[in-house]
Image (cartoon, rainbow, N blue to C red):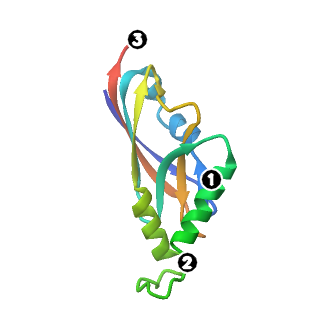
Amino acid sequence: MWTQHHLTLPPQRRGFHLITREVVAAVPELAKVRVGLLHVWIQHTSASLTVNENASPDVRRDFERYFNHAVPDGWPAFEHTLEGRDDMPAHIKASVLGPSLTLPVSAGRLALGTWQGIYLCEHRDDGGARRLVLTLQGEVGG
């Protein structure tokens, strides 16, 4: 079976946001898949996706602190500045983390570890709504 859905996430403040529930809710066919893969793609160049700790909000804040330190807004050497001080840093952060995830599906559920969740990594102060393409492939059955 193959199916595809589009999910538009509302605008988020800059930071790392858990979106696991929203992704799962957007793909109702997931419950029917015995074994498969869910590919999650973000259609933006200034936001990204990753999987990490889903319990402690400290982890998400520390991710934000680290990336803002590593790639600061307004670095004078950046040439691409027409869209604001946070735009080029957002492109770099998005490239480092990446635009997609491929997640295993087992017995109708994402096969994430106990403490794992899907993050939307918003790298802009005013990034706006973010669009995801969710493609599920797998073997249906019980």
Front-most of 71 and 98? 71
At label 3, which amino acid type do we have? Gly
For the question of whether residue 123 can be seen, the reply is yes
Q: Position of residue 43 (x, y in %)?
A: 40, 57
Question: Observer-nearest residue: 113 or 131?
Answer: 113
- The residue type indicated by label 2 comes to Asp
Residue occupying image coordinates x 47% and y 52%:
49
Residue denoted by label 3:
142
Determine whether the residue tagged by mark 2 lies in a helix, strand or loop. Answer: loop
Disc nearer the start of the sequence (2/1): 1
Q: CA distance from mark 1 to mark 3?
A: 36 Å
Quadrant of image for the N terminus? top left
Give whichever of 101, 44 is nearer the camera: 101
- Name above or below for residue 91 compared with residue 120: below
Task: State the residue position of label 2.
Answer: 73
Identify the amino acid type marked 1.
Answer: Arg
Q: Is residue 117 above or below residue 78?
A: above
Left-right relation of 48 to 35: right
- In space, the residues marked 3 and 2 are separated at their CA atoms by 51 Å
SS for tag 1? helix
Q: Quadrant of residue 86?
A: bottom right
Neighbour class for label 3 at 10 Å: few (<14), some, many (≥20)?
few
The image shows residue 30 at horizontal and vertical percentages of 44, 28
Q: Earlier in the sequence, mark 3 or mark 2?
A: 2
Give yes or no for contact between labels 2 and 1 (Cβ–Cβ under 8 Å): no
Question: Pointer 1: what residue?
Answer: 60
Tell me whether circle 3 and circle 2 mark residues in contact (CB < 8 Å): no
- For the point 61% across and 41% down, the residue is 54
Label 3: which secondary element: loop
Mark 1 or 3: in front is 1
Seen in the image, is 118 located left or right of residue 12? left
The local crowd at label 1, few if under 14, some if 14 to 19, many if 20 or more residues have their Cα within 10 Å, is some
